[in-house]
Image (cartoon, grey):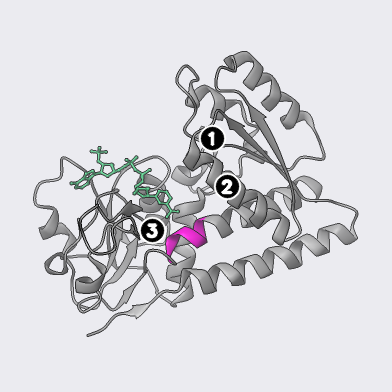
Amino acid sequence: MTARLIDGNALAREVRAEVAGRTAALRTRGVNPHLAIVLVGDNPASQVYVRHKMADSEATGLAATLHRLPSDTPEPALLGLIARLNADPTVHGVLVQLPLPDGLDARAVISAIDPRKDVDGFHVANAGALATGLPGFRPCTPWGCLRMLDAIGLALRGLQAVVIGRSNIVGKPMALMLLERHATVTICHSATADLAALTRQADVLVAAVGRRHLVTADMVKPGAVVIDVGMNRVPDGEPGAGRLCGDVDFEAVRDVAGWITPVPGGVGPMTRAMLLANTIEAAERQTA
Ligand code: NAP
């Protein structure tokens, strides 16, 4: 069997087109949907992510403002900026790029964002809303994964889903979203005994670890849907050194799986697109 590809780039284009349409509709009502991004310090990867977020926003007609602060910014100053953005009715989404420099408490900072503007979906109020089945903002990466499963028409009810990874931004919310759709969900992590025995049961397997080739072909049930969230680099000395790769041994697993997401071109573009979807949602809710 050769798995069919779930094309994250194509699906992300669809999401962006939807967002662009909704943005245009809000503008006709005089609302200018606006995302504020806060970047503290000069982490090179964060700078790249923020550039993408700004460019994506502008390409879909959303206004985006970048607030850059030096890495030695005292926490009260950062909290003060967030308070001003929370209070500003022209700002609909507030995102603080993580990780924060040492000395700043990410939990306290995220908690300071108004949950109605928390387009990353990381605030405890939004995490709690997901856990208890209430509406709220869903974290962009698992939200994008769910959208990919919907795009292939997968009915999750009654399926066995296995999520590898239990972070607050990917693994846990992914598991909750699958549970909300009536899948039977197993969450695996670094202390899981016999990971392969569990993954082999999975109709839907989500890998969100950050370890290249963690998921090998013998760990995958024939026909399964495999979603690869991992972002790793091929190590020096190997063919394709430096290239982006996922957690799944793509070439081998595609012969076993029914559907598979590539890396790059899978979950990454969907994560970016779902931030735009959350931002337009925030603008619509605040101006309804
Ligand atoms: P994280 O916070 O480091 O969490 C990794 C999880 O993997 C942890 O729960 C850890 O278990 C588990 N784990 C580690 N080794 C394991 C093993 N051998 N077997 C089973 N589980 C194991 O990472 P994250 O933020 O969730 O991100 C995960 C990956 O997704 C990374 O590669 C990241 O770059 C990528 N990512 C991609 C996107 C995208 O848009 N494509 C977005 C976000 C993240 P413990 O909890 O026991 O430590």
Residue under circle 3?
178
Q: Mark 3 and mark 1: span between their CA atoms?
A: 20 Å
Name the residue type under label 2: Phe
User: Magenta includes 267?
Assistant: yes
Left or right of 85 on screen, residue 101: left
Left or right of 14 on screen, residue 199: left
Q: Quadrant of residue 257?
A: bottom left
Residue under circle 1?
123
Q: Mark 2 and mark 3: span between their CA atoms?
A: 16 Å
Secondary structure category for the residue under label 1: loop
Quadrant containing the N terminus in the rendered view? bottom left
Please rate how many residues cluster around mark 2, counting C-alpha atoms within 10 Å: few if below 14, some from 14 to 19, many from 20.
many
Q: What residue is at 55 percent from the left and 41 percent from the top?
A: 47
| CB-based contact (under 8 Å), mark 2 and mark 3 | no
Mark number, residue 137 = 2
Mark 3 vs mark 1: which is more N-terminal?
Answer: 1
- The x, y position of residue 198, in whole percent, is 15, 58
Q: Which residues are magenta?
A: 266-271
Mark 1 vs mark 2: which is more N-terminal?
Answer: 1
- The x, y position of residue 44, in whole percent, is 49, 39
Q: Mark 1 and mark 2: span between their CA atoms?
A: 9 Å
| CB-based contact (under 8 Å), mark 1 and mark 2 | yes
Q: Quadrant of residue 12?
A: bottom right
Image height check: is 236 above or below 106?
below
Give the overall secondary structure of the magenta segment: helix
- The x, y position of residue 73, in whole percent, is 59, 18
User: Magenta includes 33?
Assistant: no
As rendered, which of 35 and 52 lies closer to the eye? 52
